Amino acid sequence: MAKMDRRIAKTQEALKKAVIELMSEKSFDEITIQDIADQANLNRGTIYLHYQDKYDLLDKLIESHMNELGEMDEWACQLDWSNGLVPFFEYFEKNHLFFSTMLASKGAPSFRTRLLDYVMEGFRGEIDRESGRNEDLNEDIMLQYTGTAYVGIIEWWIRNEMPYPPQIMAEQVGALLKRSL
């Protein structure tokens, strides 16, 4: 894969940061391209060199976070629940502004659905079918239950300014997921 020019990467990061900062202040529909340009301290035309419009910028921002979460899946799923969740909670903590904005924003309601779909798909392969304890349970119901609980606890944690460190969250949530799946 070709390495991206640092100036391009820096510009795209500034634009992504600007849109998230603006979304923490007002709804996405109220944000203009000029607002984003002003917040990023860039020329309006620069945005169009990188993105088709503000929707493309938001979509690419969401996609980059979903891809990073997906990359963590590949190795974290090899660990037990508690240890496997630590990097995810650390990621949510590190990207607090993004997740708090996206989960609270009325301008990006599809994000929660996208996150829930991602989580449920990840949990699909984690259901314990061997012990027999889940044999009478419908997979769709189990996934909806655990996925909604997991996304809900992320929302609660972020909205409450992360009252517990990522390690404690991973330990507690991991124990609950182990019981459920």
Image: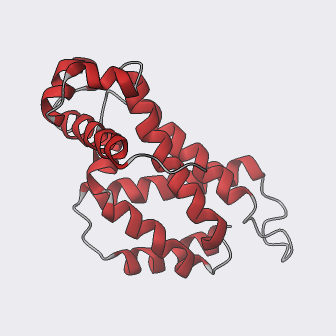
The correct choice, above or below, for 165 with respect to 126 in the image is below
* Between 136 and 55, the one nearer to me in the picture: 55
Residue 111 screen position, x and y as percent: 45, 37
Q: Is residue 173 visible?
A: no
Left or right position of 123 against 93: right
Nearer to us in this view, 109 or 20: 20
Residue 122 placement: quadrant: bottom right
Tell me the residue at 30%/35% (across/down). 105
Look at 69% across and 49% down and name the residue there: 141
Measured as percent of width and height from the top left, residue 100 is found at 29, 49
- The residue shown at (26%, 66%) is 162
Relative horizontal placement of residue 154, taking residue 140 as reference (left or right): left
Whole-percent x, y for residue 97 in the image: 26, 51
Query: Which quadrant holds residue 130?
Result: bottom right
Q: How is the image coloured?
A: secondary structure
- 40 vs 101, left or right, is left
Give the vertical position of 120 relative to 44 (above or below).
below
Q: Is residue 26 left or right of residue 134?
A: left
| Whether residue 150 is situated above or below residue 27 in the rendered picture | below
Q: Nearer the viewer, residue 94 or 175?
A: 94
User: What residue is rendered at 39% in x and 70% in y?
Assistant: 90
- Give the quadrant of the C terminus: bottom right
